Amino acid sequence: MEFRITCIPGDGIGPEIVAEAKKVLDAVAVKYGHVMRYTDILMGGASIDVHGVPLTEEAVETAKSADAVLMGSIGGDTTTSPWYKLAPNLRPEAGLLAIRKALNLFANLRPAVLYEELAGACPLKEEISAAGFDMMIMRELTGGLYFGERKTVEENGVRKAIDTLTYDENEIRRIAIKGFDIARKRRKKVTSVDKANVLDSSRLWRKVVEEVAAAYPDVTLEHMLVDNCAMQLVKDPAQFDVILTENMFGDILSDEASMVTGSIGMLASASLNDTKFGLYEPSHGSAPDIAGKDIANPIATVLSASMMLRYSFDLDQEADAIDSAVKAVLQAGYRTADIMSEGCVRVGCKQMGDLLAERIK
Ligand code: NAD
């Protein structure tokens, strides 16, 4: 099959890590008889330097015409880069917000996986980390408290700030459907996280998630209050498969879940709309401190490419091949600097890409 992929190399280590992800995708294409056609667009600082804005209309149109978007990362050193002297709407990150909006990406997927070989980096006690974990946090991205009406007023000399948390049933239903669909590709369990003991929006969330669950009898649904979930993530992370939650809870829980893996260079992510289309990118930033040195870890981007194959192209076998290659390379003892440990072989960004591509061939 043929797939059109728009690539956003971006800034900092972005171009280096995207190049390695392409290398791995090309190895998959050769092995399984697919054709991957890439078109690069500029975004973030790279676009500011050429066009004066972090994202152009043409770039958005190119992204829209593709089957999926694969991104490195954007942004520079926020204290020294001249990009951060520009007005906020012209800074690199404005490009990211604009493309998410233009592509209607409402579902954010963040896997948190503890690899046996990297268990030493996990900050949890050994008796907890020994069980390993492999969870997917599905966060609603365009509604809730971050997008509600807000204002600050002064009443009788007292300043008062108001934020509103709103969800309608359609917003909840579309993300719940995504969550259950993804659980079907995994271990078939959804933990829906809310604060239904206090919030009306959470009570509606729970009802609509239950309605959606009726169409997925093969998937187990449980509900968990967000405060309990925050505790369970450090007490027994192995219990989770898919965590389905609203915007603010997901923001906090996904950062907590990624911290317990201990390795920022390994964490992939995806943002999806209501078709098969998605934007795939590592969870980390553009790491300007190590850019151009061939020492960045490309695995988070490679695993983002694997998610693209699985969730946008329905190529589960090919995605499994990438995931297995990552495990095999770690098992063989190869490490980039960020995940290096005693007795392992240190490799650069390019060599890590080569090793992964070789495992796939
Ligand atoms: P960062 O994630 O770029 O870096 C944090 C630390 O982790 C740094 O020491 C960096 O060297 C290291 N690191 C990150 N990715 C790595 C990798 N793949 N391999 C090895 N080491 C890695 O976060 P930051 O320094 O806070 O942000 C730098 C820039 O990235 C900022 O401009 C920020 O706005 C931007 N940013 C962009 C995105 C995005 O594009 N989605 C996300 C987060 C941050």
Image (spheres, rainbow, N blue to C red):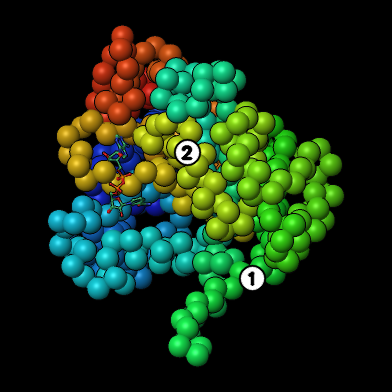
From this viewpoint, is residue 109 visible? no
Which residue extends farthest top? 343
Residue under the point 17% across and 39% down: 292
User: Amino acid under label 1?
Assistant: Thr
Where is residue 298 drawn, in percent x and y? 34, 34
Q: Between disc 1 and disc 2, whose residue precedes?
A: 1
Measured Cα–Cα span from mark 1 to mark 2: 27 Å
Residue under the point 75% across and 57% down: 197
Of 171 and 164, which appears nearest the observer?
164
In-image side of 359 versus 149 (left or right): left
Disc ID at residue 263: none
- Secondary structure beneath disc 1? loop
Disc ID at residue 166: 1
Where is residue 203 drawn, in percent x and y? 76, 61
Residue 287 vertical position relative to residue 351 in the rendered view, above or below: below
Residue under the point 64% across and 70% down: 166
Q: Which residue is mark 2?
A: 258
Of 171 and 15, which appears nearest the observer?
171
From this viewpoint, is residue 60 visible? yes
User: Amino acid under label 2?
Assistant: Ser
**In the figure, residue 248 lies in which quadrant?**
bottom right
Local crowd size for mark 1, using a 10 Å CA cut-off: few (<14), some (14–19), many (≥20): some
